[in-house]
């Protein structure tokens, strides 16, 4: 299991951006974070074409499939979708890692038992404004 934002473990942060210009305000080789929404498709496409790692927060099974097809490195889901998302990722051999968004360490064990690739705490997501 991989961890982002856990207080014991040093790891990379994700940078929540709202437009293409915001990418310029992130550190080199960083992972950008966005909600999967149709209005963000231009940002997602721009990032993929420029080899910028993308983490997409999705809300449905269909969006999980879109995120993988659009080249996301990480697909962030709510805990309720964890088992389904992981099964889909394994069935279709996604390159992306499935991360469950959590607020409390007590949630880790349940997600580990479900076989989820990793977890992300909200403090690992830094908002960037241009």
Image (cartoon, grey):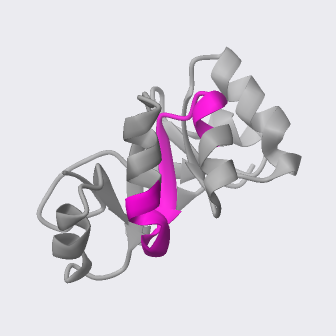
Horizontal side of 71 relative to 125 (left or right) equals right
Asked if residue 2 is positioned above or below residue 53 in the image, the reply reads below
Residue 103, x across and y down, in percent: 36, 80
Total tally of numbered discs in the picture: 0
Residue 112, x across and y down, in percent: 19, 63
Residue 121: image quadrant is bottom left
Residue 5: image quadrant is bottom left
Horizontal side of 130 relative to 88 (left or right) equals right
Furthest residue to the front?
91
Highlighted range, magenta: 67-84
Residue at image x 84%, y 34%? 42
Asked if residue 61 is positioned above or below residue 122 in the image, the reply reads above
Residue 50, x across and y down, in percent: 65, 16
Residue at image x 69%, y 16%? 49
Furthest residue to the right?
39
Residue at image x 29%, y 55%? 116
């Amino acid at each position: 299991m991989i961890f982002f934002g856990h207080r014991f473990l040093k790891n990379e942060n994700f940078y929540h951006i709202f437009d293409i210009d915001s990418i310029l305000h992130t550190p080199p080789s960083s992972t950008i974070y966005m909600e999967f929404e149709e209005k963000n498709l231009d940002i997602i496409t721009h990032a993929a074409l420029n080899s910028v790692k993308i983490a997409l927060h999705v809300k449905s099974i269909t969006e999980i499939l879109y995120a993988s097809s659009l080249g996301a490195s990480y697909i962030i889901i709510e805990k309720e979708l964890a088992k389904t998302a992981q099964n889909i990722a394994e069935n279709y051999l996604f390159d992306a890692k499935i991360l469950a968004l959590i607020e409390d360490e007590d949630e880790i064990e349940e997600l580990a038992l479900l076989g989820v690739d990793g977890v992300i705490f909200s403090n690992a997501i830094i908002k960037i404004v241009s």
